[in-house]
Structure formats: structure tokens, C-alpha cells
Image (cartoon, rainbow, N blue to C red):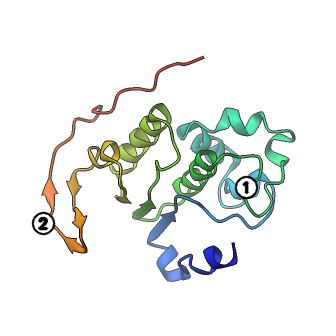
Amino acid sequence: RQRALASRPRITPALRAVVDLCCAEPAFTGGMVERHAGVSRATAYRTVEGLERVGLLPTIEQLPRGWETDLGDDGQGLSAGERARLGLARALLDDAPVLLLDEPTAHLDADTAAVVHRVLREESAHRLVVAVTHRDALAAVADLQVRVADGRVGAPVAQAPAPNAMPPPTNSG
């Protein structure tokens, strides 16, 4: 655990002003849901809106103490996918011109990943969204792909995905 925390990138205030970083496994340093969701950086309305956009609001509301649930240092009480979506919701609160994501759909099922795909397309309308991924479904949402194989960076490939190229999430349950 210590090594994983030590290897996380250090973001300086100058870099934070232009780049929002969202890792597949966001760091939690103790505290309640409201802190990790970014309530201190934004209005409660914007925080709720961000959680709704990533489909996480019902989960937060069903936690034992709701917004006041202590997530501890490892996001206890949330699955890996829920922790990743909480990190994404937090990143959506900022207005940095670049959103950098590391495997944003790594721990998500297809329906939940489709929700995240739609959010990233919406975000790309007003800021640069860069996602590192191994998943073809997420790469297909991109306007431009750069593939890396065997340590070599390929030529950028432009594509024009349809705004609704991803299937809508199904209602299961």
C-alpha cells in the first residue's frame, strides 16, 4: 500500500490549474463522502450534479450514513468502480482545460462504462479529454487515437464518432 501511494504522480498547484487528473484507483486519505466528492471545492448542487452524471448518487445516498459515511484511507464501503467514478465526479467539478484519465472504465460493467463514455464526450465539448485505456469501447469514443505497442507510439488516427455511438445503458433491475 505504501509503495502504491508513493508512486502516485505529484501534482503542483500550477499544473492543477490546467489539468485535472483522474486515476483508475483514486487516492483516498480518510474523511467523509462529502469531502471526497468535492463539496469543499464546489457548491453542494454541483457536487450532486457530478455524482448524478457518473451514476453514483443513488449509491452514496444508500451508504449507512449517506454523505457523512467515513470512507477511510481506502474508500471502504465502495467497490473499485464506485471509487473510480467518485474520483471522476470530483474531477468534473474543476474547470481545468485538460482532463487526464487513466483507465476510467477499468472496473466498470458495460452499462456503467457507457455512462462514463457519455460524460467524457460531453466534457470533450469544452475541454481536452485525454484517456489512457486498454478498452476498445472507450477508444472508439475518441476523436483521435494514438496507439502504443511494443514501446512504440503510432501515428495519430483521426475518427469522427457519432455523438451517440455508445449504446445507452440498459435498465436492469
> At 55% from the left edge and 19% from the top edge, which residue is drawn?
172
Horizontal relation, residue 95 to residue 132: left or right = right
Picture coordinates of residue 14, whole percent (x, y): 50, 82
Q: Is residue 159 above or below residue 40?
A: above
Q: Using the image as rendered, state which of residue 139 and residue 165 is in the foreground.
A: 139
Q: Secondary structure at mark 2?
A: loop
Q: CA distance from mark 1 to mark 2?
A: 38 Å
Horizontal relation, residue 159 to residue 127: left or right = left
Q: Residue under circle 2?
A: 155
Picture coordinates of residue 89, whole percent (x, y): 57, 50
Q: Using the image as rendered, state which of residue 18 and residue 172 is in the foreground.
A: 172
Horizontal relation, residue 159 to residue 32: left or right = left
Q: Using the image as rendered, state which of residue 19 and residue 23 is in the foreground.
A: 23
Q: Secondary structure at mark 1?
A: loop
Q: Quadrant of residue 158?
A: bottom left
> At 58% from the left edge and 46% from the top edge, which residue is drawn?
81
> At 73% from the left edge and 55% from the top edge, which residue is drawn?
75
| Amino acid identity at mark 2 | Ala
Q: Quadrant of the N terminus?
A: bottom right
Q: Quadrant of residue 55?
A: top right
Question: Extreme front residue here?
Answer: 150
| Amino acid identity at mark 1 | Gly
**The disc label shown at residue 75, or none:** 1
Picture coordinates of residue 150, whole percent (x, y): 24, 70
Q: Quadrant of the C terminus?
A: top right
Picture coordinates of residue 58, whole percent (x, y): 68, 32
The 10 Å Cα crowd at callout 1, few under 14, some 14 to 19, many 20 or more, is many
Of labels 1 and 2, earlier in sequence is 1
The 10 Å Cα crowd at callout 2, few under 14, some 14 to 19, many 20 or more, is few
